[in-house]
Amino acid sequence: MPIRVAALYHFTRFDDPAALRAPLLGLCEAQGIKGTLLLAREGINGTIAGTPHAIDAVLAHIRALPGCESLEVKFSGAPDMPFHRMKVRVKREIVTMGEPDIDPTLSVGHYVDAADWNALIADPETVVIDTRNDYEVAVGTFRGAVDPKTPTFRDFPGWFRDNRAQLLAGKKKVAMFCTGGIRCEKSTSFLRAEGIEDVFHLKGGILKYLEDVPEEDSLWQGECFVFDERVTVRHGLEQGTFQLCRACRRPLDEAALAHPDYEDGVSCPACITERTPEQRAGYAERQRQEALAKARGQAHVGAVRPPKE
């Protein structure tokens, strides 16, 4: 059966997100769905994969949740299941910004469809900001976009406040983008709270742009990092060329894979100095166990262990 990947998020108000967890997880497991869904008082966010019929069943359940009737989903395909397990987690935020007063259901920037995005970001009066993490931007971004070089989305508000004057000098509009749109919803809401009115964001995010805009007309350069086993995607949402470091979860290109500091499952040039010898030894043992399980034709990552008697 073909694998369908569904990336989704929706800002709404859940009075008790914890009460929604068990029924949602139970349905996903019953349908053979894998991936991650986050629940918080501000809504739902995540990416899941499974058969088209199973995905439809889970999406019908989510759309029946309070305020989720208009949930929009970005679909793509994968040659194999891109996740190892199913997780439904209750969080403080569905995407962590650390600004408790920001509410995208009350104030957000202007949505721009993928077909109209090129004209906006080519306008010299527009400053274009990539709101993603530094390792994502390194894989690919829009031509001329500002890279905040932020390790996490939580760092974005501080970065903007520190660089506001320089960013807005001679500019009338701010255009922001992210993978699927959720970080842009929060970041445009944040900028409006900071008193900036002409704020725009790419509707559906990079994924929608790569799906809809022909490569010959595209202003996108490189590939787009995704948080699953596909690692990156290209135009048409085809699987990209990067691999994943199992130690730090960063994307690796051919140069990184050929680097002396790269060891499969243990280290890469980016994380070699970030991990202790003890941690790397643990990663090496994990990699050994995975290889043994694979040789036996068994799953290691994501395996469901029988209960102890």
Image (spheres, rainbow, N blue to C red):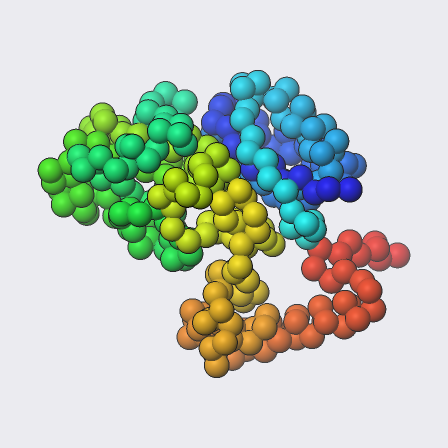
Could you tell whether 232 is left or right of 220 in the image?
Answer: right
For the image shown, how many numbered marks are present on the structure? 0
Look at the picture and state if 85 lies above or below 291. Answer: above
Spot occupied by residue 241 in the image (x, y as percentages of width and height): 53, 59
- 205 in relation to 163, above or below: above
Give the residue displayed 55% in from the left and 34% down from the top: 74
The image quadrant that residue 60 belongs to is top right
Give the answer, above or below, for where 170 lies relative to 158: above
In screen coordinates, is 223 left or right of 166?
right
- Which residue is located at x 83 percent, y 54 percent? 307
Q: Is residue 56 left or right of residue 192?
A: right
Q: Percent x, y for residue 35? A: 64, 44
Name the residue rendered at 46%, 71% in the picture: 256
In which quadrant is the N terminus drawn?
Answer: top right
Question: Residue 113 in the image: x percent, y percent?
Answer: 40, 28
Residue 296 percent across, percent down from the top left:
83, 69
Q: Quadrant of the C terminus?
A: bottom right
Q: State the residue in front, 153 or 232.
A: 232
Q: Residue furthest front?
A: 216
Query: Would you say 125 lies left or right of 4 here?
Result: left
As drawn, the residue found furthest toward the left would be 170
User: Residue at (54%, 19%) from the top-left corner?
Assistant: 70
User: In this view of the protein, which residue sits in the foreground, 298 or 255?
Assistant: 255
Residue 184 visible in this rendered orientation of the protein: yes
